Image (cartoon, rainbow, N blue to C red):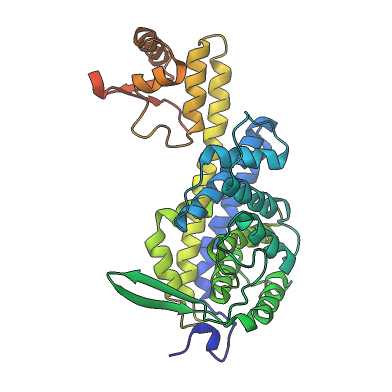
């Protein structure tokens, strides 16, 4: 049975356009809402939002591939890319490379895609990796590029990509299609197909998933005419099994309606989370302004630390031990500080004794 790239109509992917009409409307509505929010933010909140979104996208895209990046180092590296002040966090090689990729995707969002660009992205994430023979270059090995699962003592072949000798020609076609002014009727459809099309070529030895997801961000941004800040990989990581299953269903067909519908839903969820994050950052700014002169340095330090954890805050909530660890203060002082924050209605207290936890009382 033929792979998708062996079919007569390759690479003419098709999907049911009407199935995306309502999703496309919601996507554009959400994009407009995000742009409106961003216009109302101050310079500091705007910069933090960029760092949070790009950091989340880079971290979760790597997590999908089983690579865990240090969040603090990654965000610090992104700040360095933008020339923003950092707090002296040590720059780690993998995090630095991913930061360069995310920065490049963001700042070149309106530029045409080129071979040099995707090569630059690949070079960034594998600059210090010794297991890659051709960093920044398409694969050249003679053996087949296969996606194989090694489980329970047996191998299962999921997909075999075009041979290395055909990759330059396939990427020529892909880049022409990506940059074409004859855009499909749906921005979501274009982004979904861009991802599955690129993954089908699988042009690099490694890193195809991360670069393929970066192309989604670029495709969406080109569709709306400006950088679109959403962390699609965060949602994909949460739905990784369904994500891989949906991709696998495209391996032997060019009719990809189920994939396009699934991927569009993931993008809409990512938009909703991104809007929630932006609202969270605005709520943070408002809260800290209201608390000026009402809280001490220890309390402010802890609140900033909670906000640094993002939407979810501390896993399982803030405990007195967390407070003591962050502020290096006594238990009696920590208890008093926390009680004051509850009285100010900044924190909400749950549980009793050793199960006592504190949560931000911020609505967004």
- Considering only vertical position in the picture, is 91 above or below 140? above
- In the image, residue 252 lies at what x, y percent? 46, 83
- Considering only vertical position in the picture, is 284 above or below 94? above
Q: From the image, which quarter does the N terminus lie in? A: bottom left
Residue lying furthest right in this view? 111
- In the image, residue 194 lies at what x, y percent? 59, 69
* 104 sits to left or right of 151: right
Residue lying furthest front in this view? 130
**Residue 26, quarter of the rendered image:** bottom right
For the point 67% across and 68% down, the residue is 137
For the point 42% across and 76% down, the residue is 249
For the point 35% across and 19% down, the residue is 320
- In the image, residue 356 lies at what x, y percent? 28, 22
Looking at this view, is 56 or 207 the one in front? 207
Looking at this view, is 220 or 128 the one in front? 128
**Residue 289, quarter of the rendered image:** top right
- In the image, residue 101 lies at what x, y percent? 64, 53
- Considering only vertical position in the picture, is 309 above or below 289? below
């Amino acid at each position: 049975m033929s792979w998708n790239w062996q079919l007569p109509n390759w690479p003419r992917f098709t999907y049911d356009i009407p199935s995306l009409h309502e999703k496309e409307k919601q996507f554009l509505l959400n994009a407009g809402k995000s742009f409106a929010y961003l216009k109302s933010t101050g310079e500091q909140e705007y910069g933090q939002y960029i760092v949070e979104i790009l950091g989340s996208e880079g971290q979760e895209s790597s997590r999908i591939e089983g690579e865990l990046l240090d969040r603090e180092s990654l965000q610090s590296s992104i700040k360095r890319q933008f020339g923003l002040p950092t707090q002296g966090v040590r720059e780690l090689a993998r995090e630095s490379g991913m930061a360069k990729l995310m920065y490049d995707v963001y700042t070149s969002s309106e530029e045409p895609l080129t071979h040099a660009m995707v090569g630059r992205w690949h070079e960034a994430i594998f600059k210090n990796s010794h297991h890659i023979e051709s960093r920044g270059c398409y694969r050249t090995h003679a053996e087949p590029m296969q996606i194989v699962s090694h489980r329970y003592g047996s191998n299962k072949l999921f997909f075999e990509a075009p041979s290395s000798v055909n990759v330059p020609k396939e990427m020529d076609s892909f880049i022409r299609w990506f940059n074409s002014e004859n855009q499909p009727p749906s921005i979501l459809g274009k982004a979904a197909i861009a991802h599955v099309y690129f993954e089908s070529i699988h042009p690099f030895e490694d890193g195809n998933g991360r670069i393929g997801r970066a192309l989604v961000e670029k495709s969406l941004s080109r569709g709306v005419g400006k950088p679109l800040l959403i962390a699609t990989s965060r949602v994909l990581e949460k739905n990784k099994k369904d994500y891989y299953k949906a991709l696998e269903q495209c391996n032997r067909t060019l009719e990809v309606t189920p994939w396009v519908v699934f991927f569009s839903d993931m993008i809409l969820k990512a938009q909703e989370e991104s809007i929630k994050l932006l609202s969270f950052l605005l709520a943070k700014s408002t809260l800290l302004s209201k608390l000026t002169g009402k809280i001490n340095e220890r309390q402010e330090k802890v609140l900033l630390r909670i906000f640094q954890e993002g939407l979810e805050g501390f896993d399982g909530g803030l405990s007195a031990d967390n407070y003591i660890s962050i502020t290096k203060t006594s238990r009696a002082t920590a208890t008093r500080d926390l009680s004051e924050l509850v009285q100010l209605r900044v924190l909400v207290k749950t549980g009793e004794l050793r199960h006592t936890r504190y949560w931000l009382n911020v609505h967004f």
